[in-house]
Amino acid sequence: MRTSSLRLLQEPTVVVLAAGHGGMDSGATNPPHEERKQTITIADQTAALLRGQGIEVEITPHDEDTDKSITWVNKNFGFGDAWVLELHRDSAGGLDFDDASRRCGIYYGTSESSKDIGNFVRRSFILNSAHPNSWARPDTASRFGRLGWIRQTRPVAHLLELGFMQGNNDDAHLSWLAKVAATVIPEAFTGRSL
Ligand SMILES: [Zn+2]
């Protein structure tokens, strides 16, 4: 797109979305809701909204888990080709319902340029009605210490957490989260606001 203010996003021309988890791993649950099913819904809706804005989008195959999605990404894209985003729903107890419904976050990688994207996206989340507690953190602050999606993919990669499983799980709310993602991503990727 070459119009982004963010250095690592000036070269890539494609956004790649992956639904978090998969294979034997359904992610977080809040019965009857499963994170994996929701991330597929959100990834598909986000892709459609981005394509409607003229952005080229690929989705990693939904029948693959994270490891296979990483392999798929690396087979199809190198550094500078794409911005690859894995979509998740967060999980924690003790949050008030509105916070749990609207708090979003982004994990970034080790470089300052990756962090710049994280901080941009956090600000954009909040300006687009995500909860003010929305955050940007290095992957070292995740519960796994480091995230394969960010460390092992060749293109620039981030991981988004879109609301909590303990918040609103209505279809309309999942669509709202997709709309937030499909607003925040172009602002970072092309410098355009809707
Ligand atoms: Zn997850």
Image (tube, rainbow, N blue to C red):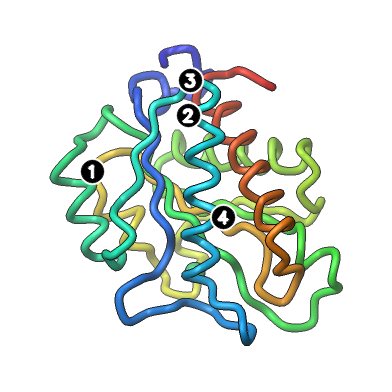
Spatial CA span between label 2 and label 1: 23 Å
Q: Residues within 10 Å of mark 1 (few under 14, many from 20)?
A: many
Residue located beneath label 4 in the image: 137
Marks 3 and 2: CB-CB under 8 Å? yes
| Residue drawn where x is 32% and y is 32% of the image | 82
Spatial CA span between label 1 and label 3: 24 Å
- Choose the circle earlier in sequence order: 2 or 4: 2
Instruction: Kindly state the secondary structure of the residue where label 1 is placed.
Output: loop
Q: Residues within 10 Å of mark 2 (few under 14, many from 20)?
A: some
Question: Is residue 184 placed above or below 152 in the rendered structure?
Answer: above
Task: Please state if 96 lies on the left or on the right of 11 as rendered.
Answer: right
Q: Amino acid at mark 3?
A: Gly
What is the x, y in percent for residue 97? 84, 71
Q: Nearer the viewer, mark 4 or mark 1?
A: 1
Res. 122 image quadrant: top right
- Choose the circle earlier in sequence order: 1 or 3: 3
Q: Amino acid at mark 2?
A: Arg
Q: Amino acid at mark 4?
A: Arg
| Residue drawn where x is 61% and y is 18% of the image | 192
Marks 2 and 4: CB-CB under 8 Å? no
Residue located beneath label 2 in the image: 51
